[in-house]
Image: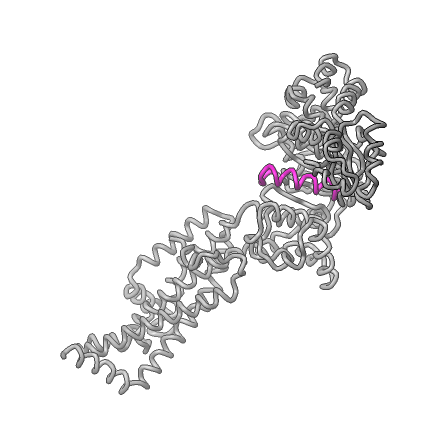
Amino acid sequence: MIKMENVVKKYKGMERPAVNSLSMEIGEGEICVFVGPSGCGKTTTLKMINRIIEPTSGEIYVNGINVIKQDPDKLRQNIGYVIQQIGLFPHMTVFENIAIVPKLLDWKEEEITKRVKELLEVVGLDPEENSSKYPKALSGGQRQRVGVARALAVNPSTMLMDEPFGAVDPVTRSQLQNEFLRLQKKIKKTICFVTHDIDEAIKMGDKIAIMDQGNLVQYDTPENILFNPNSEFVEDFVGSDRSLKVLNLLHIETVLKRDIKTVKMNNDIIVLHNFFENNKKKRAIIVDDSNKVAGYVSRNDLIKGSSSKGWNSIIKPIPTTLPMQATLRDALALMLQYDLVAVPVVEDDNSLVGVVDLNEIRTHIGEAYQEFGQDEEGCSDGAI
Amino acid sequence: MALFDFFMSIIMYFVNHMEKIASYTVEHFVLIAIAILFSLVIWVSVGTAIRNNSGLAKSVLSVGSFIMSVPSIALYGILVSMPGFGLSRKSAVFGLILYAMLPIVRNVYVSLNQVDESILEAAKGMGLSPRQVLFKIQFPLALPVILAGIRVAMVMMVGIATLAVYIGERNLGSLIQQGIVRTHDVMIIVGAIIVSILAFIVDYLLGKVEKLIVSPGLISDMPDMASKKEVA
């Protein structure tokens, strides 16, 4: 937990404080994203927490302990720190980079070895393959992962991340964001996250703190920031396309239709015929014995090639599926790309969970606006 | 044919005076070894001490440049005339130390300041004390450039040490100096060749040392990048 009380940072010769009387609380296990235009004080705020920048006045507590009264090195050893340029030490191997703080804290050799291996696995790098590599041999995404592993080395309860995914290409960024969110579900750290990208803020944050000219303008959940911006500044900052951004927030889970009817590959063809007789659907999803998606059969194909034996040959592969953690935005993107009205949702092992369909998404977005938003404009936007 | 004879006489001189040449070479090497040891202790400390003070660094480095621009013969002349030095090895060593000032101090100062800001911030943010940052991060990263400075200093010392014969040293410079006095061409050339070989060997050995102690993570895949890092 992080608590700030009337924190001020003034630089000499500057009229306006870089951070002006900031008070806020970041709950245990939450990701709080600081976002705002450059010079708004977000990075300064973050760096005051581990005293890379000393506050001019005010109190900052990390887990109830006043950071100003703590030895700065001790303080920092217990707060994970990830910066945009990552700052891996080029003369040390991946192993040595991750092991540096545990070594400072005099961990035993075998404990360190075990921890590094564990961390590399956690961030999705093969320990055997990568431990002895030097940073120069890693790609941008891999470096970022090592950076996160290094910050997690001594299992700090708090992490500070300053535009951690800013220096990688958009595809890698979104991949790293997803991985990090999945990881956070397990490790539940209290995280301060700085970005200038509102989309990233919406995606990553449990709470978003929007700052402008050293002031905290709005500190709220992403839903409230999007649906109820408290000022023109926030509204502008979020952007006119906020109805699209909402899609990033809503998970397919809420519109997912589970327990849908499927036909098994080893069913008799009669089952397939019954399927199409009993409902109006144009296509049937075919699964194998372990409920993994095998493909689909369309009504027309069945009529054409209805030899009773080996009907499996008319199964067509499904063009795309969605993972469980996808957002409505992902779902809509796929629907547009592949011209579909419904997309199957699968677990990591490709077993079928359910289906997301377009109508359901439309209804849901309308409901979301009614629930959170007050303005009429938002409602009409919502019905895409 | 004259060239061949000349070549033969060089070899004959070398063979006939093997013992003397060997002892000169050892003397030569001992002199620069003493000088480089002192230089390392003094100049690496100075370079480190001034790393965060650019004003002071500027003055220190201009003193170094000034010393470098003083002709060695003149510098030795001045040293010999100073009380407590005189015609002694002390003067010879001290002169060499002075010449090593610029390449070593400059490379230490520049390379410590060249370490990427983000690396230093990461180190600080992870809770390394300023001392730990210096020894665990800055020095290892600066090492290739520091070694390049040491290499320049040592190779230079091999050459300058020949002039120390004028203030009482007996080393490879003696061959050259006596050769000049006696207009003995072969003697001069043998001296010059061995000095050059010694410089080459010193350079080669330091290159090997560099490979041994610089982290592989810092060595570029392109060959010879480290020596290009010598600050011009």
- Coloured how? one colour
Q: Residue furthest front?
A: A307
Q: Vertically, is B131 above or below A319?
A: below
Corner quadrant of residue A238 = top right
Q: Which residue occupies the foreground of this view, B45 or A235?
A: A235
Above or below, comparing residue A88 to residue A334 in the picture: below
Residue at point 66%, 40% (across, down) = A175
Image quarter of the N terminus of chain A: top right
Based on the picture, tell me whether residue A182 belongs to the magenta stretch.
Answer: yes
* Residue B105 spot, x, y in % from top left: 44, 57
| Spot occupied by residue B177 in the image (x, y as percentages of width and height) | 24, 75
Q: Position of residue A313 (x, y in %)?
A: 72, 41
Quadrant in the rendering for residue A218: top right
- Inspect this view and state whether residue B205 appears: yes
Residue at horizontal 29 percent and vertical 70 percent from the top: B163
Q: Is residue A157 left or right of residue B162?
A: right
**Front-most of residues A333 and A17:** A333
Residue A170: x and y, percent?
60, 37
Taking the view exactly as shown, the residue that stands out farthest to the left is: B2
Task: Please name the residue shown 36% across and 67% down the image.
Answer: B157
Q: Is residue B229 magenta?
A: no
Q: Magenta region: which residues?
A: A166-184
Residue B227 vertical placement versus B89 (above, below): above
Q: Quick one: quadrant of the C terminus of chain A?
A: top right
Q: Is residue A341 above or below residue A54?
A: above
Residue B159: quarter of image: bottom left
Nearest the viewer among A320 and B1 is A320
Residue sitting nearer the eye, B194 or A51: B194
> What kind of secondary structure does the magenta stretch mostly adopt?
helix
Decide if residue A351 is in sight here: no
